[in-house]
């Protein structure tokens, strides 16, 4: 388990990093939590690693006019402990405790997780749920892609080889937004067998405009197409929530693997959804008296 | 001597702080000038003929010193073959360090690339070309048993490697007369030991002296010295094996692994120092596996809930070769012989068959087969309790074997002496507040929360003596030896045949020696794991460290004390009987003032012996050995309980709490004993809930990394409450029984009974370990349909 030989550069400036990335076979090294393991297992063999850890411009979580910016060097642990995130992007704060273990969170980065697009990772699903804006830069060019357009397949994204994700911008949560997150993992911190992230708006006595993303089981985060007509009323009963959950999971196309067959994952996703809807309902309408089962 | 006794005190493990601080010195840390590194090309096929091996391109790669095949090594290393004298049918073909002609499991070493760094060696492995001819694969153990199954190795005529029966009493009649008969099938998936430090070996050969020195991450250096010498045709005295710090072993590091034999052979062949450290990927396909078994069990119980008979049929998977030198039968035999060991039961019928398969060899893993027997017994007891509408605890209480007689035997022939099953049981129910838990369970069920309480009483074979391997003609020593030396500065050096892979045995031995001699424990140095410096003996296997190594240390300490007091008596012109040693000083019982120190004794004896008025100077270096020869082993016993919650919608299982009451005889160090039990329990929970080597029907391992092979981790582990009942064994003067495997013997069984107790309202009994969420959901769905 020794990596094949590769060249290594550690530029101080973004421009230099982007120019290095223009070469064939160059790859960004940020947190390295997936990359180093895949190198050591000889699953990938880049010619050049461009270590971006010295580039100051890529650091920092910022509360900006266009949203909450997370730079390419922001670690999961920074997001977990950020008061800005807790206040402005509460869904991220809800999900972060599920992201790997402390040692991985200390090194792994938000943008690195987006770039890798591991189907079991939380970050891509959260970015899709909130439709974050992913900023890609290469030598002489910069573009922004909506997260919902970014993930194309298993470990496949819209990013070109010479591009780096320099930041991701999450929209600020509105006062009437309610979020939910849950995942099933055999052990805490493992990649999820199946997970869900939900965003909804409270309008009077209902939660509506639901965005539901299912991940882990799918090749890419699945933004459910079946939610436009769905609402969670303050008095919705458990069977009603279960029906909603089943309508949503019917559109899943789960991958079959040792974590389970497709039908098992669909069943589990429906349970997670129903429970999360219940949880969101009780948080949104606290004190109003929930529906009866 | 009553003040400051160390025996019974919870002293922390001596090496703990150093190891946790990253200051361990493992085999991989040892620096040697001119060291070469080995990377193996391993078979990617579970069964294939090696038609052609082309190594030239690899040999030309940068840093490569040699590229060697099985044929190259055969010039230096003799083949070996596992043979068990009492089980002549357990025979696998002769083995070589690397495959010759035929690869029989995915992961078997084929070619060794020797280079100046491991990275360069790995680079060159990619240039080795092998032409394979795929052969039929036997992976599944039941497929191996079919009459027309292909053979695992072309030198074999059948895959059957064991067909053994047990018959005690008249089980047939007992089943006919039973008030209640229950039965169930059990499946145990393959597991492996997953040591934190992988298998590692560093071999140096000095051609001038014909001296082979091996540093080895291993449990039994004396056994390995014997094997290296035999296979490489060197005099025993020319081989030295050193086990430095070892990061976990669990029985996995008891075997002579072919790839490790290859490294020793390469050192001799090249006359250069070479090292091999298995990486995690190759550990999964080359470490010994364990536990793979299918069991059908039946149990007969009378109307009063008295267990009368069991009938057990076991099919066990051996892998491609029988592990050397101890064989691969232990798991299978224990699975049958250990059933119902804690219970009065007159009738047993058992049959066990073991089959070779195109998978890595199976071998020893902590508790060897005992978890299987315990699981089968305990789960069937619970099913019987259900049929009789009896509380499962009450059913057990009615059936414990009466161990007042010191030579009782279970129906499976297990020797039971001086046990405390009832006391452990009563203590456990009190510790866990069993009655309250049962009450709460009913209340939770009404709210749709499914909790289960599971019990597992167990017998643990510890301190195994020479009858096990000696009778099989296997050269695995069961004797443990201690050499105690009074150093010239008054300190004590204790060289023991016992080895320590994290158990803390060294600390326990220091406690025993300090108390027996009356010296400060800090002055007792323990030396282990070096065949040149430590006396001959078994090492670490079958929970023997403190029980047997401690006994040898105690006997040596008592003799050394006699010697010291003899010399002191002569110098002080006092009867030795009137002298005592406390804190390293010699006192006359009549006076509170110390007369002299151990350093004074050493100085006098070693430098001024003419001053000692004795004709013979008593020896100040004492060697004592011990092996239990009257008993095959010292049985220990205990009971465990698990409290679990099953999420019947997601299929997930949470272990809420866990309790163990164990009787390992006299407890030398409660902290270490509790740690051993907790670690063992965690491995048992891992077996029941997480661990499985997943093989496809094509014999390919599908989860060979720690991402996919799940080991139990801290977040999921419950508090494990441990209490003790102490019944010292009369087999030794020390009175300690072993404890290293206790947790693992019973923990999986407690999880089985707890989870199935939780699922009682659904009429579901799980039958496949580990209990994955999908298996739980499938079982629930099957019953509902």
Image (tube, coloured by chain):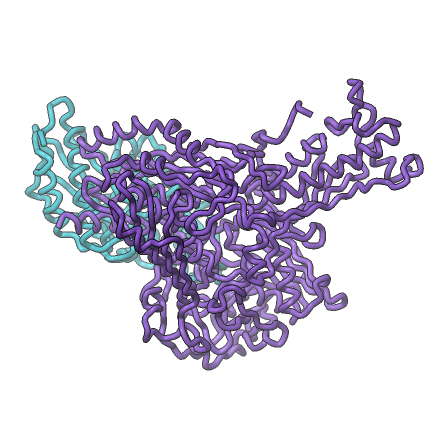
Q: Quadrant of residue B683?
A: top left
Quick one: quadrant of the N terminus of chain B? top right
Residue A71 visible somewhere in the drawing: no
The residue depicted at 53 percent of the width and 60 percent of the height is B326
Quarter assignment of residue B672: top right
Q: Nearer the viewer, residue B386 or B752?
A: B386
Whole-percent x, y for residue B525 in the image? 69, 39
| Chain A colour as displayed | cyan
In the image, A54 versus B655, the foreground residue is B655
Q: Evaluate whether residue B754 shows in this view.
A: yes
Q: Of all residues shown, which one is farthest toward the bottom?
A: B51
Give whichever of A60, B347 is nearer the camera: B347
Front position in the image: B160 or A273: B160
Q: Position of residue B140 (x, y in %)?
A: 34, 65
**Is B183 situated above or below B15?**
below
Q: Is B469 left, or right, of B452 in this rendering?
A: right
Classify B354 as above or below A86: below
Residue A110 coordinates in the image, percent (x, y): 34, 44
Residue A111 rendering spot, x and y as whole percentages = 33, 46
Q: Which chain is represented by purple in the image? A: B
Residue found at the far left of this picture: A229
**Drawn side of residue B616 relative to residue B655, left or right:** right
What residue lies at 88% left-to-right and 41% top-to-bottom? B616
Q: Is residue B574 left or right of residue B730?
A: right
């Amino acid at each position: 388990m020794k990596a094949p030989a590769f060249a290594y550069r550690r530029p101080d400036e973004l421009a230099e990093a982007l120019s290095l990335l223009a070469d064939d076979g160059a790859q960004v090294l940020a947190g390295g939590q997936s990359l180093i393991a895949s190198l050591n297992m000889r699953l990938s063999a880049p010619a050049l690693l461009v270590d971006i850890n010295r580039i100051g411009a890529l650091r920092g979580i910022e509360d900006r006019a266009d949203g909450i910016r997370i730079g390419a060097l922001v670690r999961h642990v920074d997001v977990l402990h950020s008061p800005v995130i807790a206040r402005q992007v509460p869904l991220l704060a809800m999900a972060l405790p599920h992201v790997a273990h402390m040692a991985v969170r200390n090194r792994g980065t938000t943008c690195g997780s987006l770039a890798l697009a591991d189907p079991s990772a939380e970050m891509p699903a959260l970015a899709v749920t909130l439709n974050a804006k992913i900023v890609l830069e290469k030598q002489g060019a910069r573009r922004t892609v909506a997260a919902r357009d970014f993930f194309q397949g298993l470990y496949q994204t819209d990013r070109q080889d010479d591009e780096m994700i320099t930041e991701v911008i999450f929209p600020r949560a509105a006062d009437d937004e309610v979020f939910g997150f849950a995942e099933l993992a055999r052990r805490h911190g493992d990649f999820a067998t199946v997970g869900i992230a939900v965003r909804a708006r409270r309008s009077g006595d209902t939660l509506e405009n639901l965005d539901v993303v299912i991940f882990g089981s799918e090749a890419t985060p699945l933004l459910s197409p079946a939610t436009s007509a769905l609402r969670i009323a303050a008095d919705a009963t458990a069977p009603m929530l279960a029906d909603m959950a089943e309508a949503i999971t019917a559109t899943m196309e789960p991958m079959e693997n040792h974590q389970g067959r497709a039908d098992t994952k669909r069943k589990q996703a429906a349970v997670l959804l129903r429970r999360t809807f219940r949880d969101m309902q009780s948080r949104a309408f606290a004190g109003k008296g929930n529906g009866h089962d | 001597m009553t003040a400051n006794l160390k025996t019974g005190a919870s002293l922390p493990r001596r090496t703990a702080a150093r190891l946790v601080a990253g200051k361990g010195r493992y085999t991989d840390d040892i620096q040697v000038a001119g060291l070469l590194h080995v990377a193996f090309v391993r078979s990617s096929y579970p069964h294939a003929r090696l038609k052609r091996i082309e190594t030239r391109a690899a040999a030309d790669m940068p840093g490569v010193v040699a590229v060697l095949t099985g044929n190259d090594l055969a010039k230096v290393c003799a083949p070996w073959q596992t043979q068990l004298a009492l089980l002549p049918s357990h025979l696998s073909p002769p083995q070589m360090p690397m495959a010759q002609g035929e690869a029989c499991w995915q992961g078997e070493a084929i070619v060794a690339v020797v280079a100046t760094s491991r990275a360069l060696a790995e680079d060159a492995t990619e240039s080795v070309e092998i032409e394979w001819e795929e052969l039929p694969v036997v992976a599944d153990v039941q497929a191996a048993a079919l009459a027309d199954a292909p053979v695992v190795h072309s030198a074999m005529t059948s895959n059957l490697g064991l067909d053994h029966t047990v018959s005690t009493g008249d089980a047939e009649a007992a089943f006919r007369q039973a008030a209640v008969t229950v039965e169930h099938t059990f499946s145990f998936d393959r597991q492996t030991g997953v040591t934190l430090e992988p298998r590692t070996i560093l071999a140096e050969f000095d051609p001038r002296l014909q001296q082979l020195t091996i540093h080895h991450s291993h449990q039994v250096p004396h056994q390995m010295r014997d094997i290296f010498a035999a296979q490489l045709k060197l005099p025993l005295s020319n081989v030295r094996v050193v086990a430095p710090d070892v990061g976990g072993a669990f029985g996995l590091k008891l075997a002579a692994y072919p790839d490790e034999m290859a490294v020793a052979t390469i050192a001799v062949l090249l006359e250069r120092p070479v090292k091999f450290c298995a990486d995690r990927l190759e550990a999964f396909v080359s470490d010994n596996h364990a536990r793979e078994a299918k069991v059908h069990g039946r149990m007969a119980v009378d109307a009063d809930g008295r267990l009368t008979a069991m009938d057990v049929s076991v099919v066990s998977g051996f892998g491609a070769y029988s592990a050397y030198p101890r064989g691969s039968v232990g798991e299978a035999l224990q699975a049958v012989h250990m059933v119902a060991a804690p219970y009065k039961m007159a009738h047993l019928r058992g049959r066990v068959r073991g089959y070779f398969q195109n998978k890595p060899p199976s071998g020893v893993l902590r508790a060897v087969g005992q978890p299987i027997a315990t699981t089968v017994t305990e789960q069937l007891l619970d099913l019987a309790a259900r049929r009789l509408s009896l509380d499962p605890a009450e059913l057990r209480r009615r059936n414990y074997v009466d161990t007042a007689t010191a030579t009782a035997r279970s129906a499976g022939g297990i020797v039971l002496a001086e046990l405390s099953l009832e006391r452990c049981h009563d203590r456990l129910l009190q510790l866990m507040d069993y009655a309250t838990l049962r009450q709460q369970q009913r209340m939770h069920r009404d709210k749709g929360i499914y909790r289960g309480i599971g019990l597992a009483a167990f017998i643990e074979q510890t301190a195994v003596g020479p009858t096990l391997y000696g009778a099989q003609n296997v050269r695995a020593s069961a004797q443990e030896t201690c050499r105690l030396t009074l150093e010239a500065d008054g300190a004590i050096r204790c060289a023991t045949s016992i080895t320590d892979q994290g158990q803390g045995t060294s600390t326990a031995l220091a406690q025993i020696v300090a108390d027996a001699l009356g010296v400060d424990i800090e002055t007792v140095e323990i030396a282990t794991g070096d065949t040149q410096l430590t006396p001959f003996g078994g090492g670490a296997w079958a929970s023997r460290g403190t029980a047997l190594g401690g006994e040898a240390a105690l006997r040596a300490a008592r003799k050394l004390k006699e010697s010291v007091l003899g010399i002191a008596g002569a110098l002080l012109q006092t009867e030795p009987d009137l002298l005592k040693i406390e804190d390293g000083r010699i006192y006359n019982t009549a006076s509170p003032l110390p007369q002299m120190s151990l350093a004074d004794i050493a100085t006098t004896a070693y430098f001024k012996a003419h001053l000692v008025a004795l004709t013979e100077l008593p020896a100040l270096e004492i060697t004592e050995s011990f092996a239990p020869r009257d008993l095959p082993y010292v049985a220990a016993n205990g009971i465990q309980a698990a409290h679990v919650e099953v999420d019947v919608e997601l299929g997930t299982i949470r272990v809420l709490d866990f309790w163990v009451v164990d009787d390992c005889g006299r407890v030398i160090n409660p902290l270490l004993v509790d740690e051993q039990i907790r670690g063992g329990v965690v491995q048992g929970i891992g077996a029941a809930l997480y661990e499985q080597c997943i093989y496809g029907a094509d014999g390919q391992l599908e989860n060979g990394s720690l991402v996919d092979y799940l080991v139990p981790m801290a977040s999921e582990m419950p508090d494990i409450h441990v209490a003790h009942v102490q019944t010292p064994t009369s087999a030794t003067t020390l009175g300690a029984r072993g404890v290293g495997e206790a947790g693992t013997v019973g923990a999986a069984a407690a999880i089985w009974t707890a989870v199935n107790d939780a699922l009682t309202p659904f009429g579901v009994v799980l039958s496949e370990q580990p209990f994955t969420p999908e298996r739980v959901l499938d079982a629930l769905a099957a019953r509902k349909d």
